Image (cartoon, helix red, strand yellow):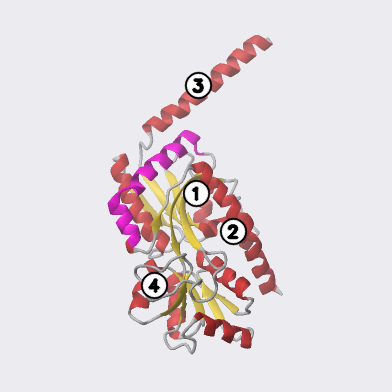
Amino acid sequence: MDRRHFMIGSGLAATAALMGSGAIAQTYPNQLVRIIVPFSGGSLTDILARSVAEKLAAKWKQQVIVENRPGIAGVSSVAKGPTDGSQIMLTSNGHSVIGVVNKNLNFDPIKDFAAISRVGSTPSILIVPPDAPFKTLAELIAAAKAKPDSLSYSSAGVGSSTGIAAELFRHLTQTKMVLIPHRGLPESQISIMRGDTSVAFTFFGVGGDLIQSGKLRALAVTGKSRMAQLPDVPTFAEAGLPEFTYDSWFGMLAAAAVPKPIVSQIARDLAEALSDPALIKQFAAQGADIASSTPEAFEAELRSDAERYGKLIAMSTDGAAK
């Protein structure tokens, strides 16, 4: 084949590929879509995913189901799974640092995924046992500094959203506490209620009822303003730690090999779903704000978080290993 025929053939092939991708996007989805949640049922990510799935199913006129596949196996199943958009994932900002916590992953948490969109965010809430001797943030910090490693802190796993919040707190306050990881926020909260653990972070969507009923004591929230559901709980800035502002985000990802036209369509349809007043109300009831984004903006956020929080988690895990 001479150069002229090769170039014409290559051009036709590229055009056909582009047309094929466009055709795929126009017919997407033509089958059941699974939203994988790499957390257990009852987690805030799970709750929000089910609300989103309902709206997307109505938009697509196609069945959309949520499957809980907790842990690395669930994330891997998306990275290595179908590339036709029939399987996507709703996860949290802990995704950006799982490569730091787990050194032997069979996937890259950034390169092996296509960012679709941010979905929402929520502040974290610092909680202690209801009968804890410290009733304010200042008293907690003073107690932790007075006797290093005398207090313990819990999270829904190292590298989880609440785990990142805990490490930020320790870093900013220069306190030393013993880490006790759990398999989810419900388990972490039980540990706090029993008094087995001194401190933890949670979300209103998971621990709000326990806080409001007095089974957990909230000392501060990481948002820039107080939560409407917990008007008596100060922000960290109000409690004396103004540099601590942190929101956990929730976002949608697909396997990196999913065609870009499909990723773009999911992002557009998701943005439309997230503008629904009923969905906004459902998120608000869980203490979460809706916030969609373009795939490009969300990918940039993933990379930024991997850099920022990855270093923090690395210091934490290195310290724990010594």
Q: How many marks?
A: 4
Mark 1 crowd level (few <14, some 14–19, many ≥20, 10 Å Cα): many
User: Residue at the location (50% across, 35% down)?
Assistant: 260
Q: Which residue does the image show at 64% across and 76% down from the upper left?
A: 174
Tell me the SS state at disc 4.
helix
Q: For the residues marked 3 and 1, what is the alpha-carbon distance in whole angstroms?
A: 27 Å
Measured in 3D between alpha carbons, the distance from the residue under mark 3 to the one under mark 2, in whole angstroms, is 38 Å
Q: Nearer the viewer, residue 20 or 174?
A: 174
Q: Quadrant of the C terminus?
A: bottom right
Q: Which mark is residue 207?
A: 4
Q: What element carries label 2?
A: helix
Q: Which amino acid does label 2 sit on?
A: Val
| Real-space Cα separation, disc 2 to disc 1, in angstroms | 17 Å
Number of the label disc, if any, that sits on residue 78:
1
Mark 3 or 2: in front is: 2
Q: Do the residues labelled 2 and 1 touch (CB within 8 Å)?
A: no
Question: Can residue 306 be seen?
Answer: yes
Q: How crowded is mark 2: few (under 14 residues within 10 Å), some or many (20 or more)?
A: many
Front label number (2 vs 1): 2
From which residue to which does the magenta span run? 258-284
Extreme residue in the right direction: 322
Give amino acid for label 4. Gly
Mark 3 nearby-residue class (10 Å; few <14, some 14–19, many ≥20)? few
